Amino acid sequence: MTAETFPELHVLARKLLTIPPAEYPANPQMVYGYVRTGTVDPAYADACADLLTWWSVASGLRLGTIFRDRGVASTALIRPGFTGLLDVLRLPDSASALVIESKHLSGTATIAKQLTAEIRRTGSTLRILADELAEVSV
C-alpha cells in the first residue's frame, strides 16, 4: 500500500508500526474483520483487509475471515457481508469484530449505532483501529 493510494490507511499503518508487537498467547482470541466500501473496486477493500491482518498479528489475535461489503452505501441496512459477520460472532470462541474506521459501519451516526448494537448482541465486542491508535503520535 502506498501513501498516495490510500493516505488515510497509510497514516494508520505508520501508527501501527510504532506499537510494540504483542506476545502471541497460547490460546489467542478469535476475531473477525469487516470492511464496507461504497465502491466496487476491490483495491481499497484489499488494502483494508491487509491492514486488519497486520493489526491482528501485531495484537496477538487470531483473525478468521474478513467480511466485505463492496459497493454498499453507508446508509444501506441490508449487507450480506455484515450478516455473515454477525453469524460467526455468535460462535462460542468469537471475541471481537475488527474494523478500520467507524465509517466502515456507516457514516450516519444512527446507523453506525444500530450496527454496533447488533454486534454487541452477539456477545462480541467491536474494536476500531483508528480509535485505538488515536492516542499514538507519529
Image (tube, grey):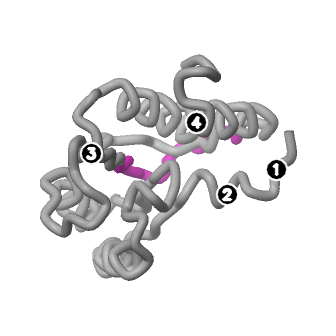
Residues shaded magenta: 22-34
Contact between labelled residues 2 and 4, with CB atoms less than 8 Å apart: no
Task: Classify residue 84 by image quadrant.
Answer: bottom left
Residue on which the image places disc 3: 67
Kindly identify which residue carries mark 2. Answer: 132
Precedes in sequence: disc 1 or disc 4: 4
- Which residue shows up at 62% across the image and 44% down it? 59
Q: Is residue 97 left or right of residue 118?
A: right
| Mark 3, secondary structure of its residue | strand
Quarter of the image with the N terminus is top right
Is residue 86 toward the left or the right of residue 135 in the image?
left
- The CA distance from mark 4 to mark 2 is 14 Å
Badge 4 marks a residue whose secondary structure is helix
The prevailing secondary structure element of the residues shown in magenta is: loop
Examine the structure image and report whether residue 135 is included in the region drawn in magenta: no
Residue tagged 1: 136
Q: Earlier in the sequence, mark 3 or mark 4?
A: 4
